[in-house]
């Protein structure tokens, strides 16, 4: 049983409490989804339950939190580990050992259990998470879903009654997401674990939970059983598209018989041909390893195809552009991989080398205004939220005025409002004649925003669907 | 990764990591102490044997070969250029780049190398390569987890072993991340080989920031899994010496004795 009684928490160096007077209780054996917009206090709630807050992340905490009827105030996180297990978003940031088996043993080893007991628990946890067959595998050879299941197995081996998961599937593909959710469902049904999960993939998780708690601005907005929860209230879907969003005539990008083979000889792509029109939005979908990212990197010019060619045409004159790289913008999945400056405005200006200073200033201001970051122009990008950093990355790509923009997994870790804002922004620039290519696992997003959806499977082009009839 | 453990099941693979670590220490000490060129070549040949026994994949062998050539070239050239005997004996100099060679000759006024220095460098190569052979054998034939357990059982503190394991575990993760950052820089056309300092700054800044973020999350995850609890920690992986290890220790003793006698002879202590 988890009980929060009038809990308020204020982070150090902050003036607004992230949780305000939160009172709720979760019964033993319940599976609860915690939902709400970014910044509403979901992660703070998770970290309060296992004592990370206020023991390791400090701030002002009032009210009382009880686990199993006992207050947890004064208990350290490591002491709570046998009662509450915590799974974080990025599986890579919570696994310590080199092999799966060793990582699962890490917690029981810390508890100082006997060797025979550790072996028994590790075996049990590996069986219950379906990882027995990969127990001796090195962790860096696992898929994202397997890594996250290893993290869960590591917690199961410590036998906590409660599992708290903060966006455990955010970095996973649909297969990995399905595996993790089914595992949680099994742990909940068969082993009676109490599960508290923060998740943006509402459609996937909703059928398995008992209750949905919605937070808003640090307060309890609603607390409803699943049966009475309206799924559309949690995930309203994408807004309707206007008919004016049609591609313009004329091919801008032509891919002819693209093949790519990795240095070790395995094929990543085989015979991909595609003609993309100006102002068109194309989505490329497919499971992990299907060649989506390899194809997009070939289009950008980051990889050279083993065979075949990519041709970019000037949207105005129709002539072939010999050096296409500068005319194609590429938005990486993780904005932190492409942000290099220590100031927001410098981050934009870095791509404008060669322009006159006044032009740089004007273009930087315009780009930051577009993504609503002008007010932060003097700030260090590290101090921005993930959504803001993603918008900064978008602005830094768009300021160079590319003809084609490739977005690799724009939905990762984004809540509904931020995702919608990003997609609406991409729609706006598409209406201005830019071509958009989206690499995604989110089929709903692909079929909603794209004019054509291309499905890749094991490096081959298997399906093309036209989603919108254009006149 | 290239110098990663390769599962082969040879006798060397089955040895306790501590035996192989002690063998590395023995080779290191002998290679430092030996002066006699013949003995150094012998040490190199002995150190090569376990490496040949572990059946290295072809591509690793090619890389090792290239590494050997680079080490040899570097050692010979540097000694040929800078060798100065401590007893002040005369050296024989030859032109590496005569002054009349266009550009290089004119710029440098000619480059002289000493024959004795080149020979001295050639002998040093065997000293270095003996250590490389043994290190490569250790890394290629020992799973990292067992290697770290071995170090821990040889007295390395538990927290340091944990740090080492975590660091090793994150090498491929960080390498992948660095490649992605470089791709992102190339995608924005802000990578310039003509500005190496700026390029290093732009590629390392995001890497360092991400590493700091990652470390912070790792610390939280470690605490959440009861790391550093006020109880003695159990080590589930343990090591045990077997008969092959005993044989190896005996062999090591013989080898040490052989080099001790050989060195004493070459120094004139034994007839």
Image (cartoon, coloured by chain):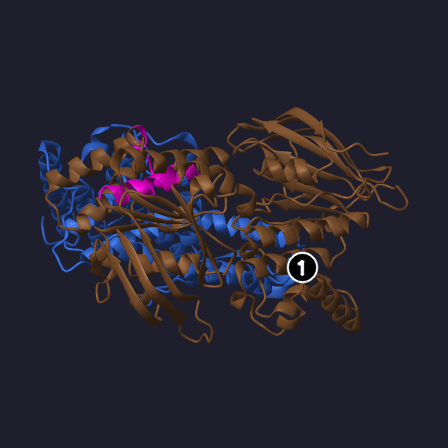
Chain colours: A brown, B blue
Residue at 79% x, 32% y is A469
Q: Is residue B55 above or below residue A91?
A: above
Relative height, residue A318 to residue A455 (above, below): below
Residue B191 shows in this picture: no
Query: Crowdedness of circle 1 by 10 Å Cα count: few (<14), some, many (20+)?
Result: many
Q: Which of the two residues, B62 or A123, is positioned nearer the viewer here?
A: A123
The residue furthest right is A317
Q: Secondary structure at mark 1?
A: helix
Q: Mark 1 = which residue? A: A396
Q: Which residues are magenta?
A: A133-157
Q: Position of residue A282 (x, y in %)?
A: 71, 37
Would residue A118 be found to the left or right of residue A410 on screen?
A: left
- Visible in this render: residue A434? yes
Residue A435's spot in the image, x, y percent?
76, 44
The residue lying at 28 percent from left, 30 percent from top is A132
A146 falls in the magenta region: yes
Q: Is residue B142 magenta?
A: no
**Principal SS element in the magenta part?**
helix
Q: Position of residue A71 (x, y in %)?
A: 22, 62
Q: Nearer the viewer, residue A342 or A221?
A: A221
Quadrant of the image occupied by residue B191: bottom right
Residue A63 drawn above or below residue A271: below
Q: Nearer the viewer, residue B231 or B247?
A: B231
The foreground one among A139 and A38 is A38
Q: Quadrant of the C terminus of chain A?
A: top right
């Amino acid at each position: 049983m988890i009980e929060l009684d009038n809990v308020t928490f204020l982070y150090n160096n902050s003036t607004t409490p992230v949780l305000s007077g939160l009172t709720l209780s979760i019964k033993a054996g319940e599976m609860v989804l915690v939902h709400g917009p970014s910044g509403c206090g979901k992660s703070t709630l998770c970290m309060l339950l296992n004592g990370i807050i206020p023991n390791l992340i400090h701030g002002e905490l009032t009210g009382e939190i009880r686990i199993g009827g006992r207050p947890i105030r004064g208990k350290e996180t490591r002491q709570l580990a046998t009662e509450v297990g915590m799974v974080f978003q990025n599986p890579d940031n919570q696994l310590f050992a080199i092999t799966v088996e060793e990582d699962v043993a890490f917690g029981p080893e810390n508890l100082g259990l006997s060797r025979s007991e550790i072996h028994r628990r590790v075996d049990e946890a590996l069986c219950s998470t379906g990882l027995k067959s990969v127990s001796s595998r090195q962790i860096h050879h696992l898929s994202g879903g397997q890594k996250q299941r290893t993290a869960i197995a590591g917690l199961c081996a410590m036998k906590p009654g409660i599992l708290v998961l903060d966006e455990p599937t955010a970095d996973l593909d649909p297969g990995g997401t399905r595996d993790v959710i089914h595992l949680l469902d099994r742990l909940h049904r068969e082993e009676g674990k109490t599960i508290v999960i923060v998740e943006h993939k509402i459609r996937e998780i909703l059928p398995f939970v008992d209750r949905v708690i919605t937070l808003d601005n640090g307060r309890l907005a609603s607390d409803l059983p699943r049966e009475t929860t309206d799924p559309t209230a949690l995930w309203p879907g994408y807004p309707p598209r206007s008919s004016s969003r049609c591609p313009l005539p004329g091919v801008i990008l032509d891919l002819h018989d693209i093949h790519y083979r990795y240095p070790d000889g395995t094929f990543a792509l085989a015979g991909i041909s595609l003609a993309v029109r100006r102002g068109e939005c194309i989505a490329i979908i497919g499971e992990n390893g299907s060649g989506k990212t390899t194809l997009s990197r070939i289009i950008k010019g980051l990889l050279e195809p083993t065979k075949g060619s990519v041709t970019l045409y000037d949207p105005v004159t129709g002539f072939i552009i010999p050096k296409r790289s500068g005319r194609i913008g590429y938005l990486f999945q993780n904005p932190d991989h492409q942000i290099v400056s220590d100031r927001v405005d410098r981050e934009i200006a870095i791509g404008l080398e060669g322009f006159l200073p006044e032009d740089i200033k004007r273009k930087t201001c315009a780009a930051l205004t577009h993504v609503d970051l002008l007010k932060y122009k003097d700030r260090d990008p590290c101090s921005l939220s993930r959504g803001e950093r993603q918008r900064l990355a978008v602005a830094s790509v768009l300021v160079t005025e590319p003809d084609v923009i490739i977005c690799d997994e724009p939905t990762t870790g984004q809540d509904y409002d931020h995702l919608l804002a990003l997609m609406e922004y991409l729609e706006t620039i598409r209406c201005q004649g830019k071509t958009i290519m989206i690499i995604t696992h989110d089929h709903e997003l692909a079929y909603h925003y794209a004019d054509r959806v291309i499905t890749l499977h094991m490096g081959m082009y298997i399906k093309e669907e036209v989603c919108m009839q254009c006149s | 990764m290239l110098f990663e453990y390769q599962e082969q099941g040879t006798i060397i693979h089955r040895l306790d990591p501590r035996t192989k670590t002690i063998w590395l220490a023995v080779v290191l000490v002998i290679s430092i102490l030996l002066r006699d060129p013949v003995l150094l070549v012998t040490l190199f040949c002995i150190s090569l044997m376990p490496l040949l026994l572990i059946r290295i994949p072809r591509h690793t062998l090619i890389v090792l070969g290239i590494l050997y050539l680079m080490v040899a070239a570097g050692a010979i050239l540097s000694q040929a250029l800078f060798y100065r005997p401590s007893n002040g004996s005369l050296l024989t100099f030859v032109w590496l780049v005569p002054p009349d060679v266009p550009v290089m000759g004119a710029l440098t006024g000619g480059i002289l190398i000493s024959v004795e220095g080149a020979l001295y460098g050639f002998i040093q190569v065997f000293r270095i390569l003996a250590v490389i052979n043994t290190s490569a054998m250790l890394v290629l034939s020992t799973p990292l987890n067992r290697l770290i357990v071995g170090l821990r059982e040889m007295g390395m503190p538990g927290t340091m072993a944990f740090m080492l394991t975590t660091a090793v575990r994150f090498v491929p993760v960080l390498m992948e991340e660095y490649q992605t950052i470089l791709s992102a820089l190339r995608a924005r056309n802000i990578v310039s080989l003509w500005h190496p300092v700026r390029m290093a700054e732009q590629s390392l800044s995001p890497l360092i920031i991400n590493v700091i973020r990652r470390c912070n999350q790792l610390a939280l995850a470690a605490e959440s899994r009861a790391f550093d609890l006020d109880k003695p920690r159990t080590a589930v992986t343990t090591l045990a010496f077997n008969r092959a290890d005993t044989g190896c220790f005996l062999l090591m003793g013989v080898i040490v004795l052989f080099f001790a006698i050989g060195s004493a002879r070459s120094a004139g202590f034994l007839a």
